[in-house]
Amino acid sequence: MRSRVAVLISGRGSNMTALIDAAADPEFPAEIALVVSNNPQSPGLDHARASGVEALAIDHRPFARDRAAHEIAIDDALRSRGIAVVCLAGYMRLLTPLLVDRWRGRMLNIHPSLLPAFPGLDTHARALAAGVKLHGCTVHYVTAVMDEGPIIAQAAVPVFPADTEDTLAARVLAQEHRLYPLALRIAAGQAAATPDPGAAFSNPLPAAVPRT
Ligand code: GRF
């Protein structure tokens, strides 16, 4: 039986769409059964509904400063729908241990850097400022510490001298859309940790990179 997965978003939802598209394959070990956004204006909610996926807005604003009550409302929605795994995909609220502990080992996040480098926001600008030559994205299990937790899979991209934040973000995002379905397969236990080393660690550098 396929695991029932919920995706938590706050905005655009392109990673959510990548997961929905991957799960359209009946061989994929998970079905995307629910999308939840804390932002009723998320374009991702409409995209999910257009794909036939139930999509709920659970706005955090009426809960004011009561983060726990908002998380309990989300948790109730997840449990009432028999969700087994939660994927955070651009979910922009910090989660408290209340929700994280309830879903420990069953909650994944995608982050646009090669963790542990550049946790937090503005990862592409910070990667450019640091002068790194490789950047990328990470899918990891969620723990109470932001952008920490056991790494499931990573994909790397080169950073070119002419890169801007936008060009680098686009290169990383293309890899995110490959990586998240792969990581969900791994987490669902139906793929070995490295089913295809080239897929789990994508390094698109040209073959003739000078060795220094
Ligand atoms: C992605 O870059 C993801 O890694 C980060 O937030 C962004 C969400 O983009 N956590 P989208 O909403 O999936 O298009």
Image (spheres, rainbow, N blue to C red):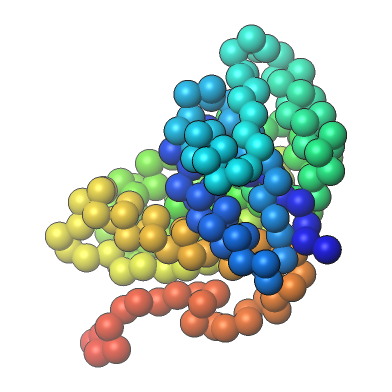
Left or right, 191 with reference to 17: right
Determine the residue positioned at 31% across, 69% down. 158
In the rendered structure, the answer to whether residue 195 lies left or right of residue 127 reads: right
The tally of labels here is 0
Instruction: Give percent across and percent down for residue 92.
Output: 53, 33
Q: Nearer the viewer, residue 126 or 65?
A: 65
Q: Residue furthest left?
A: 162
Whether residue 60 is visible here, answered yes or no, is yes
Residue 178 location (% of width, % of height): 48, 65
Residue shown at 66% from the left, 50% from the top: 32
Q: Quadrant of the C terminus?
A: bottom left
Q: Residue 48, position in %: x, y?
A: 55, 41
Specify the quadrant that holds the N terminus. bottom right
Give 179 or 143, whichever is nearer the viewer: 179
Identify which residue, 33 or 178, lies in the foreground: 33
Query: Whole-percent x and y of residue 94?
Result: 61, 32
Can residue 185 be seen here? The reply is no
Q: Residue at x 84, y 43 (%)?
A: 82
The residue lying at 63 percent from left, 42 percent from top is 53
